[in-house]
């Protein structure tokens, strides 16, 4: 057992009592233990075991274990303190204050806005113990805060977070950071021939909107990076109506747009020297007499006809035109963040986010960012057979679900549909549907399982940082031999 510098000083202040308690209790790596009434200034003290200080980047785990061990242990400690009633948590920097701040900011967060005031807890404030850690700690809080913003937008109930309310949230949150937010109405959507958005939303009385979000802090001659995501504020499945439990969860179909909003705020707060634009349709997929029918045929912005063979998947229809519109702006690259495939959580659980790309360098940037942030993506192949399955429809040029129907609603087929609308751009397709919830608190103790996770927000921020501020990646530590 080895105490950090700050822990050693605190233990000396207590006459060795802390070390004696820790030795007697025993703390597993990644875990934390709470002690009470040891010190008058700090009535609640949590001790976390962050494991080896030189764990490094493990190529088997595709993760910087030094950082993730800190996140897990610190996250567990902050949850213990918050649940004990502490409203201010002062943290040892553990030689990694940025990572400590990320974990603490995420672990301290709860969604309680819809409770009455008497049932809401006091927000937990996190602070560095060592004032010299302040700058790096603040940077970590920006990363954690951006992800918490994504979690907030994903968690707000659908009767509150309508398309217009989501738009207001974006304006209120992003404009003070110097980000432009242009919210366009139905007339504009129609004038741009983005009929996929109109068709996907026509079963709802809530009018659709389209957001163009811009952050320009790079060279004015540099092409921007483009991001797309959908804010489907509620999704009944349309005429192919969902089961109730599934439908209740679909308020989180704003997750991809929420992640992008959090990412945009974060890169602005970090003042990254890049140009980034995001394109987000905001709509409801509802059930009514005006909703799309199963087997309706629709023409996308590029003229391709699309058979809506299952109205559960009209989000893909809206994203088809959104991708075409984003591609028409001639960006440097296009990152498509989405929740379009039901099967993602079954295949991957919370372990990683499935990724498809036509550019190996982009994959390496996302892989490196995910390893740094402890929030991995995993590359999957783009086989021609999957493209054939969505382009061999008897009624139209392609189908939203395609050959095999629901039985073969697999990730590559979902990606193949989106890839048809990305032109010849370098692109990344990320499927978030599996990581918007946390059912594995052992791996992610800093993300409370009852709330949305906001995952990949920090990874996307880190990817943009790496590309905007190039630097050498850390050396990879070989995976340990498992006996």
Image (cartoon, helix red, strand yellow):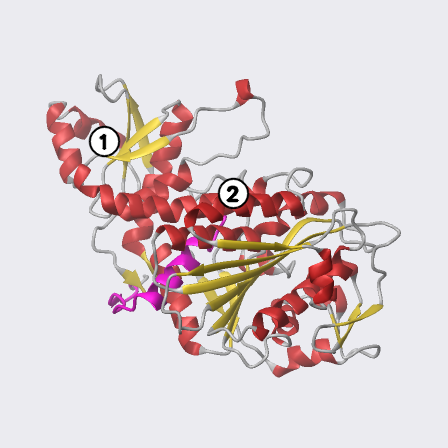
CA–CA distance between discs 1 and 2?
46 Å
Disc 1 is placed on an element classified as: helix
State the residue at coordinates (48%, 52%): 455
Residue 431 got which mark?
A: none
Residue 345 coordinates in the image, percent (x, y): 58, 56
Q: Nearer the viewer, residue 11 or 141?
A: 141
Quadrant location, the N terminus: top left
Mark positioned earlier in the residue sequence (1 or 2): 1
402 drawn magenta: no
* Residue 331 sits above or below residue 75 on the image: below
Q: Quadrant of residue 396?
A: bottom right
Q: Quadrant of residue 293?
A: bottom right
Q: What residue is disc 1 on?
A: 22
- Left or right of residue 278, residue 362 in this image: left
Disc 2 is placed on an element classified as: helix
Q: Can residue 35 be seen here?
A: yes
Q: Nearer the viewer, residue 58 or 467?
A: 467
Quadrant location, the C terminus: bottom left
Residue 153 coordinates in the image, percent (x, y): 55, 44
State the residue at coordinates (67%, 41%): 158
State the residue at coordinates (18%, 37%): 131
Q: What residue is disc 2 on?
A: 172
478 drawn magenta: yes
Q: How dense is the environment of label 1, judged by Cα within 10 Å: few (below 14), some, or many (20 and up)?
A: some
Q: Can residue 50 be seen here?
A: no
Q: Are marks 1 and 2 in contact (CB under 8 Å)?
A: no
- What stretch of residues is rendered in magenta? 454-480
Q: Residue furthest right?
A: 289
Q: How dense is the environment of label 2, judged by Cα within 10 Å: few (below 14), some, or many (20 and up)?
A: few
- Left or right of residue 37, residue 365 in this image: right
- Left or right of residue 117, residue 375 in this image: left
């Amino acid at each position: 057992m080895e105490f950090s510098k700050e822990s050693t000083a605190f233990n000396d202040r207590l006459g060795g009592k802390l070390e004696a308690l820790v030795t007697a209790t025993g703390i597993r790596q990644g875990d934390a233990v709470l002690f009470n009434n040891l010190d008058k200034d700090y009535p609640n003290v949590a001790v976390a075991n962050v494991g080896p200080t030189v764990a490094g980047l493990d190529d088997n785990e595709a993760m910087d274990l030094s950082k993730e061990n800190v996140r897990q242990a610190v996250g567990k400690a902050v949850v213990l303190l918050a649940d004990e009633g502490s409203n201010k948590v002062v943290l040892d920097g553990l030689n990694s204050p940025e990572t400590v701040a990320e974990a603490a900011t995420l672990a301290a967060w709860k969604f309680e806005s819809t409770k009455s005031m008497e049932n809401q807890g006091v927000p937990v404030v996190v602070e560095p113990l060592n004032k010299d850690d302040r700058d790096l700690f603040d940077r970590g809080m920006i990363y954690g805060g951006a992800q918490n913003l994504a979690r907030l937008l994903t968690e707000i109930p659908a009767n509150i977070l309508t398309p217009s309310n989501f738009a207001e949230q974006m304006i209120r949150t992003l404009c003070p950071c110097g980000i432009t937010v242009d919210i366009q109405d139905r007339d504009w959507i129609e004038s741009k021939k983005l009929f996929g958005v109109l068709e996907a939303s026509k079963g709802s009385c809530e009018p659709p909107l389209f957001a163009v979000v811009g952050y320009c802090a790079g060279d004015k001659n540099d092409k921007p990076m483009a991001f797309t995501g959908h804010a489907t504020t509620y999704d009944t499945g349309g005429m192919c109506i969902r089961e109730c439990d599934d439908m209740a969860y679909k308020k989180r179909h704003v997750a991809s747009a929420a992640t992008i909003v959090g990412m945009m705020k974060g890169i602005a707060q970090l003042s990254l020297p890049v140009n980034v634009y995001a394109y987000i349709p905001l709509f409801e997929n509802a059930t009514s007499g005006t909703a799309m029918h199963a087997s309706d045929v629709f023409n996308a912005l590029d003229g391709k006809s699309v058979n809506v063979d299952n109205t559960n998947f009209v989000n893909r229809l809206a994203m088809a035109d959104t991708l075409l519109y984003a591609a028409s702006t001639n960006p440097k690259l296009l990152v498509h963040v989405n929740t379009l495939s039901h099967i993602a959580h079954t295949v991957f659980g919370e372990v990683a986010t499935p990724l498809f790309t036509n550019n190996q360098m982009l994959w390496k940037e996302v892989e490196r960012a995910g390893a740094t942030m402890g929030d991995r993506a995993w590359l999957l192949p783009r086989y021609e057979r999957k493209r054939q399955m969505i382009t061999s429809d008897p009624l139209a040029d392609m189908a939203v679900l395609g050959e095999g129907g629901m039985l073969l609603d697999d990730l590559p087929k979902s990606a193949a549909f989106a890839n048809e609308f990305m032109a010849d751009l370098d692109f990344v397709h990320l499927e978030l549907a599996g990581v918007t919830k946390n059912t594995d608190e052992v791996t992610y103790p800093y993300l409370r399982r009852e709330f949305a996770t906001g995952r990949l927000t920090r990874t996307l921020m880190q990817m943009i940082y790496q590309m905007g501020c190039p630097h050498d990646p850390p050396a990879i530590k070989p995976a340990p031999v498992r006996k």
